[in-house]
Each structure stands twice: as C-alpha cells, then as structure tokens.
Amino acid sequence: MRIFAGEFLGNPWWLWGVAAGVGVGVAVLLALLKSVLGRKVAKYDDVTAPSWFRGAVDLVRRTRRFFFIVVGLYAASLVVSLPPAWDRVFATLVLVAFLLQVAFWGSGVISFWLARYARKKMEEEDAATATTIRALGFLANMVLWVIIVLVALDNMGIRVTSMIAGLGLGGVAIALAVQNVLRDLFASLSIVLDKPFVLGDFIIVGEHLGTVERIGLKTTRVRSLSGEQLVFANDDLLNSRIRNFKRMFRRRIVFSIGVTYQTPYEKLKEIPGMIREIVEQQENTEFDRAHFAEYGDFSLRFEVVYNVLVPDFAVYRDIQQAINLELYRRFADEGIEFAYPTQTVFLQRPEPAAG
C-alpha cells in the first residue's frame, strides 16, 4: 500500500482516486438522467404532450456529452487542492463548455419557438409571416453563436476588440470576393421582409411561371406547370418583373368579336345590349362596357370588357366559354354572321373607246 502513500501536486494518491471517482460519477449520473428523461418522453406523442413539455425535452436532448465530461472534471477538481494556475484553467474550461452548451440550448429555444409560431401561422394560412419567421430564425441563431463565441474568447484572455477590428478589415476583403453571394443573401432578406411573394404563390418571371416552393438564402425555387423545378438567384429574381397571381382578387377581361360588313344597321345597334345581357347572366361577373370599336379590314369589331370577381383561372375560362357559346347561339338566332378574313374582287369590263 506504499504506492498510495505518495503525493502528486500536494494531494495524496488516494485523494486523486476519490476525485476521479467523483468526476466519473457526476458525468455518468448526468448522462443517466438525460437517458431516463428521454425514455419518459417516449410515452408521449406530439399530439398529447403539452408544448412546454416538448420544448423542455428538446433542451434535454440538446445537452451534449462534452458538457457532462467537463462538469465531471470540475467536480473532481473541487475534491483536490490545485495550484492557482490549474484552478484558472479548470474555471475557464467549465465556463467555455457552459457557454457552448448555452448556445445549443438557446438555438433549441429559438428553433422550438419559431417552429411553433410558423406552424400556427400556416394553420391560419398566413404563409408570408411563416416565411419571414423561418428566415429570421437563421439570423437569430447566427447572432446567438457570434455572441457566445466572442464571450468565450474574451474569457479565455483573447483581446476580442482587436480581433473584431481585424475581422472588420478582413470582412471587407471577403465581402468583395463573395459579393455575388452577399447580393443574393440581402435579396433573400428583402424577399422575406418586403414579401413580394411567399411560399405557395403562383408567379410569372419573364417567360417562366410556376408556384413558389422554397425561398432560400441564395436561391428561390419554383415548380413550373410542366413539372420541372426552376431555380432563380434571389438577386436576379428581384431585378426582374414579377407577376404574382396569388394576390389577384379579380380579373379584368377584354375580348373582341367581329361581324360582317353586311350586318344591318339595326342589328349592329342591338349587339352591345345583347353582349351585356349575356355577360350579366353569368355568376361572379361584373359587366363594364361593350362598344362598336372600329372598322376592321374585314369586320366590324366590337370590344367587350368585364370583370371576373374571383381569381381562379379555371372559373374565368368556364365563364368565357359560356359567354362564347351563348353569343354563338344568339347571333345564329338573330341572323348575325361572325366575320372571318375574306376578299371581294370586283370585275369591271372597260368601256370601248368612242370612235
């Protein structure tokens, strides 16, 4: 037993053994506690468990093993007497580990709250706010980690102010190198905050059209009508002319018809009223005007304007079809002919010269 009579750093070997046992015991106890809580939550599902309980469990799951180990080492250091330099090392190690763990917990709190709020907004069909919350969640996590890292470095004796100044100069150089990425990033923030469109909106950009599937930090993805996915850089997207049909509340429809020049004057006078009557018979329509607009090359052209009071494209096409069919029937009953491109050739025999 003479080996246990020796000392190390002013502490007997048996005390070091006790310290090691305390350290391992604390680390194992914390790990077991986490495991037990994990098994307990298995009895609940996402529907039956209250939201605060699911949030607390998520924080437990985000507790890292390195945190248990560091806490165990700190508990072991309390058993023995260490030189002041070692005490400072252990204190700094514990503080850094605690700050990192706080960052994981904070990230979990942010993610849980944002997911809950976004889910609530999606249930309320407020996709714009849900999109904003998701993007701001990334920024909140980034700010949290930057603050935690700076505080940790400061407690490790590193001059953070000098580092920030150096990073500022380096940041300018990096910004110049990745300016395209930064433009897309700021364009993403503009999309999120200004909301020219949100998830689920049907948009037209140039000759491309489709439904917005995802708004990322660099690109926005749109599912086209033909099935393929279109990927737009956010900066290019904002520099384009965007037509958002999801925010259409009504459609203004303009169409024209032409009748032949042989149509009697009295019939021409009846056509605007006839068109008005047909349009007003349709549901979800609001008649605007119908006029004899102009003399065309081969027809007398009438221009018609009306509003469809719902934005659905299929409803508009059904209404226009009904109007066209009824116009065809009414014109046939009234003996009015639709015009189509024709040419009339007049042949005249020249008169013989007098003589």
Image (cartoon, helix red, strand yellow):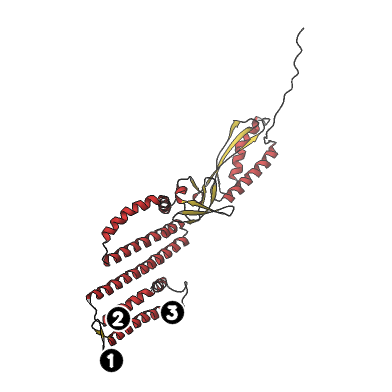
Q: CA distance from mark 2 to mark 3?
A: 30 Å
Instruction: Tell me the quadrant of the picture where the C terminus can be found.
Output: top right
**Can you give x and y, in whole percent of width and height, for residue 114 in the image?**
41, 63
Residue 221 position (above or below residue 331): below
State whether residue 69 appears in this view. yes
* Numbered disc in front, either 2 or 1: 1
69 with respect to 210 (left or right): left
* Amino acid type, callout 3: Lys
Q: Which residue is mark 2?
A: 76
> In this orientation, which residue lies closer to the viewer: 259 or 127?
127
**Label 1 sits on residue:** 2
What is the three-letter code of the residue carrying label 1?
Arg
139 or 275, which lies in front? Answer: 139
Q: Quadrant of residue 107?
A: bottom left
| Secondary structure under the numbered disc 3 in the rendered image | helix
Q: Earlier in the sequence, mark 1 or mark 3?
A: 1
Dot 2 falls on a residue whose secondary structure is helix
Can the viewer see residue 310 in this picture? no
| 326 with respect to 95 (left or right) | right
**Residue ID for mark 3:** 40
Would you call the spot at circle 1 few (<14 residues within 10 Å), some (14-19), or many (20 or more)?
Answer: few
Query: Residue at horizontal 32%, vertical 77%?
Result: 71
Disc 1 versus disc 3: nearer the observer? 1
Who's the residue at 29% across and 65% down the image?
A: 153
Q: Nearer the viewer, residue 54 or 351?
A: 54
- Picture residue at 50% right of the left edge, 54% below the top: 221
